[in-house]
């Protein structure tokens, strides 16, 4: 019985990896440019902040300089349970400071839900809502791209996510590599195949009418993933805009990175439990591969959890002298599965090549497997602590402005000059 389950699990993990490899091929080419429109949509730009006095000012300055008519967007800083000068800095910068104090419901999901209720009460109503984290920066043409997508029919849009500080440490470099891979070989294939994309927590744009109709309702530790699931259930497929760039600040140390990823995995387990089977069954009944694909993305955290356990068990079994105790299709068909492992890792240098990453980033591929393997213990610990709903704050060490960032293939410098 145990051997049968192990064999079935290994086959599933191999097929899941092969499926993502097949999808990745559709990310090699970029889609044609979509129709452009004159500025038309009005935006409420929300900045989620908890004790962000060090970085929120740089983002506000950045947002105030968008290449978009100033009368078509307003900036709101959600000062959520702040004990520093975040709200005061927002007021000094001439934007709206919305202070929330609720010690029982902490976290970005709750703060955003509260802000939407406040926003709908205001005299001015907006066509769309944009959400940033306080440590972000955005390309000057971000709102222009969101306007185009909204006018072209998109209701929920995710921008291209990149890092502000890829050169700060090997951990921030690993985060940058992950972003480039996800943008090009995870999000882009789904764009080209007309499937649902996944929200990334920041740089998100939502049609205001849709939000009013379905509500936010995403208060888990991974509110972006939760809202993605809710949208796909309702046949609203989030889209991805490759040209709208948002830059996120990543933790500098391995410990801080693990703490952040632990929160993500804890939240991911919660969302997987609630949405995997309903969305999978809905996809099967409706013969919707998009819904099945989204369900598989939801359950990926269990794939990682169980896959790490099975792999470690097989490694130990192989290392112990004598006959193997567990059956292993990896040993039975070594060429097939060694090729699968090679191609899986090869996606990351391919992503760097396609995204024209700086040459200095290539050396970080040496330690990148360590970063990938570190997901295993993080996910394992998250499984046994998944009922922990405590949101954790990422500390910031310095201020980075758009003009101080290293030039990359994003045409950021051209956008500034323009």
Image (tube, rainbow, N blue to C red):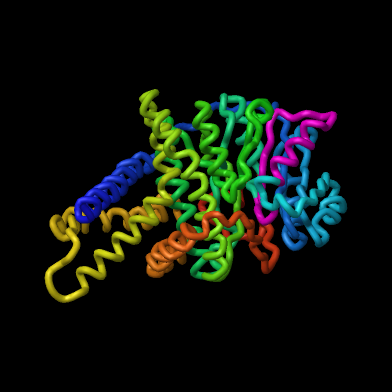
Residue 132 rendering spot, x and y as whole percentages:
66, 47
Question: In this view of the protein, which residue sits in the foreground, 269 or 190?
Answer: 269
Query: Outermost residue, bottom direction?
Result: 321
Q: Nearer the viewer, residue 176 or 283?
A: 283
Relative to 82, 343 lies left or right? left
Q: Is residue 416 visible in this depiction of the protein?
A: no
- Count of all numbered marks drawn on residues in the image: 0
Q: Would residue 282 be counted in the magenta stretch?
A: no
Provide residue 209's location: percent of width, then percent of height.
67, 26
Magenta residues, start to end: 111-137
Q: Is residue 415 above or below residue 69?
A: below
417 up-or-down from 209: above or below: below
Residue 333 in view of the camera: yes
Q: Residue at x 79, y 49 (%)?
A: 100
Image position, residue 284 (x, y; %): 36, 28
98 shown above or below 57:
above
Give the image location of residue 228, x and y in percent: 53, 38
Residue displayed at 38% across by 24% down: 285
Q: Quadrant of the C terminus?
A: top right
Residue 386 horizontal side relative to residue 96, left or right: left
Instruction: Determine the residue positioned at 66% across, 65% down.
Output: 395
In the rendered image, residue 125 lying in the magenta stretch gets the answer yes
Q: Residue at x 64, y 56 (%)?
A: 391
């Amino acid at each position: 019985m145990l051997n049968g389950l192990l064999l079935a699990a290994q086959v599933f993990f191999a097929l899941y990896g092969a499926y993502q490899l097949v999808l990745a091929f559709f990310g090699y080419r970029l889609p044609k440019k979509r129709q452009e429109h004159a500025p038309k949509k009005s935006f409420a730009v929300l900045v989620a902040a908890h004790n962000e006095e060090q970085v929120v000012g740089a983002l506000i300055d950045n947002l105030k300089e968008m290449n978009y008519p100033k009368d078509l967007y307003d900036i709101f800083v959600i000062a959520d349970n702040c004990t520093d000068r975040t709200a005061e800095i927002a007021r000094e910068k001439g934007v709206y400071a919305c202070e929330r104090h609720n010690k029982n419901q902490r976290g970005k999901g709750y703060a955003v839900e509260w802000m939407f209720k406040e926003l709908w009460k205001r005299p001015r109503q907006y066509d769309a809502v944009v959400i940033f984290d306080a440590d972000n920066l955005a390309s000057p043409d971000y709102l222009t791209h969101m306007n185009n997508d909204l006018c072209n029919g998109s209701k929920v849009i995710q921008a291209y996510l990149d890092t502000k500080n890829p050169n700060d440490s090997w951990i921030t470099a690993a985060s940058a590599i992950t972003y480039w891979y996800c943008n090009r070989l995870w999000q882009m294939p789904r764009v080209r195949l007309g499937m649902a994309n996944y929200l990334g927590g920041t740089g998100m744009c939502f049609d205001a009418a849709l939000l009013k109709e379905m509500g936010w309702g995403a208060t888990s530790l991974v509110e972006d993933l939760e809202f993605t699931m809710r949208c796909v259930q309702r046949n609203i497929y989030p889209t991805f805009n490759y040209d709208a760039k948002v830059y996120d600040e990543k933790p500098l140390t391995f410990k801080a990175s693990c703490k952040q990823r632990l929160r993500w995995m804890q939240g991911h387990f919660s969302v997987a439990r609630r949405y995997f089977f309903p969305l999978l069954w809905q996809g099967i009944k409706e013969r919707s591969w998009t819904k099945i694909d989204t369900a598989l993305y939801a359950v990926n955290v269990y794939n990682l959890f169980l896959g790490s356990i099975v792999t470690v068990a097989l490694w130990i079994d192989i290392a112990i002298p004598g006959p193997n105790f567990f059956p292993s299709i990896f040993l039975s068909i070594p060429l097939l599965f060694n090729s699968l492992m090679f191609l899986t890792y090869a996606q990351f240098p391919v992503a760097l090549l396609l995204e024209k990453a700086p040459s200095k980033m290539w050396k970080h591929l040496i330690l990148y497997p360590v970063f990938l393997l570190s997901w295993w213990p993080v996910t394992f610990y998250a499984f046994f602590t998944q009922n922990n709903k405590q949101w954790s704050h990422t500390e910031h060490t310095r201020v980075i402005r758009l003009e101080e960032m290293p030039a990359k293939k994003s045409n950021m410098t051209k956008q500034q000059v323009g």
